[in-house]
Amino acid sequence: MGIILAIVAIAIVLGLAWLLSNDKKYIPFKGIGIMLVAQVIITWFMFNTSVGETIILAISDLFNKLISFGRSGAEFVIGGIEISGDQVFLFDVLMIIIFFATILSVLTYIRILPITIKYVGAVLSKITGLPKIESFNAVNSLFFGQSEALLGIKSQFHRLTDNRLYIVSASAMGSVSASIVGAYMTMIPPEYVLVALPLNMFSALIVASIIAPVKTEEEDDEVDVKDVSGAKSVFEAMANGALDGGKIALIVAAMLIAFLASLELVNWIIGSIFTGVTLQQILGYVLAPLVFLMGVPMDEVINAGSLMGTKIITNEFVAMTQYGDISAQFSDKTKAIVSVFLTSFANFSSIGIIAGTVAGISSEKGRIVSRFGMKLLVGATLASVLSATIAGLFV
């Protein structure tokens, strides 16, 4: 029964994307089929084979070790502050972002990341038939934030038609930055975060390729990874990474303060009209039918839907802070589905971030992104639903 419901959920996602399509006759069905099969194989391998489970455990251990290193730096800075409770967001999440951004900057400077991304993107392009720029950007979005990923292809923006611009923007919104993956892993189960990364990359491409299909491959596409860092030494790269990480941590903190406070305000207004009712509960009921089709047991759909809805209207960090309060009520299947869904930038605030970044590169293309902003959010949300549904099939 669960498999049938999941197939229905996947069909709904693909069907809605088809209804939104700009040009249905150019939809790359072969490439979409290949990516769907790749998602199923990856999820099965990572969840249902001893080798896959060993790989996930090894990567999780590596990230946990890196997180412990990050905490050492945080302890020096904020040492002596009395900590109560299981987790302090400033210490266990925001400070970790700074360390991971530093590592990312160093790996970019020594060109390990740029070269890896270029050639993995080339392989992805060959397998799926997608143009090189879109494939490179999809892989690039696994490691860098929305703004950084788009800036990485700014020299090729003149080649991007409206549909191609939609695809690269969707990849940026449907993914997450490696600099904050460590922070996510302190808030939700690490194994689901790791599985979500490749699933979301493929899901974003699948949905975007249906909504905004590219007619022909651009043979003259170029992907240049020279001088992507801008740093003159490894120490400058470390400093730049630390500063960038500090900015990200500050932005996350500011957005959390604003969104959580606003959420409390909205709940107070709703509660004054309908006693005991919250916005999260309303969102849970609205999304309940879809959440049930995704594989969540009936007695858990409201709470799961409330987290998913909260993520869409605020951001993933707000939802993740609430995840810990109710996750004990969830089955393993629901934990997998909700965690994978939360691991992306698909929310309202991302529309402004992406449109602003694109406008900084090309004002004309920035206006184009602003026009299809809501369509971008719908597509990225459908991609999150697709990833979460596939993950739930193997738990």
Image (tube, rainbow, N blue to C red):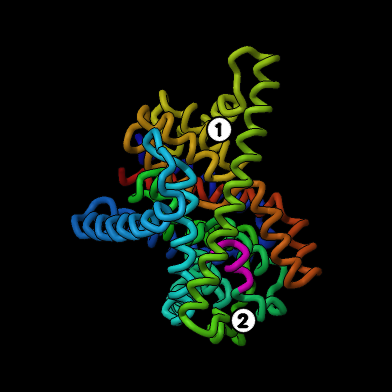
Residue situated in front as seen by the camera: 230 or 128: 230
Is 94 on the left-hand or right-hand side of 46? right
For disc 1, the marked residue is 287
Q: Residue at x 63, y 45 (%)?
A: 255
Q: Residue lying furthest top in this view?
A: 275
Residue situated in front as seen by the camera: 207 or 326: 326
Quadrant that contains the N terminus: top left
The amino acid type found where label 2 is placed reads Glu
For disc 2, the marked residue is 218
Q: Where is residue 367 in the image (x, y as percent from the top left)?
A: 79, 62
Say which label, 2 or 1, has the lower sequence index: 2
Quadrant that contains the C terminus: top left
Q: Which residue is drawn at 56% across and 25% down?
A: 281
Q: Principal SS element in the magenta part? A: helix
In contact (CB < 8 Å): disc 2 and disc 1: no
Instruction: Determine the secondary structure under disc 1.
Output: helix
Residue 6 sits above or below residue 200 on the image: above
The segment highlighted magenta reads 144-151
Instruction: Determine the secondary structure under disc 2.
Output: loop
Is 271 on the left-hand or right-hand side of 324? right
Residue situated in front as seen by the camera: 355 or 50: 355
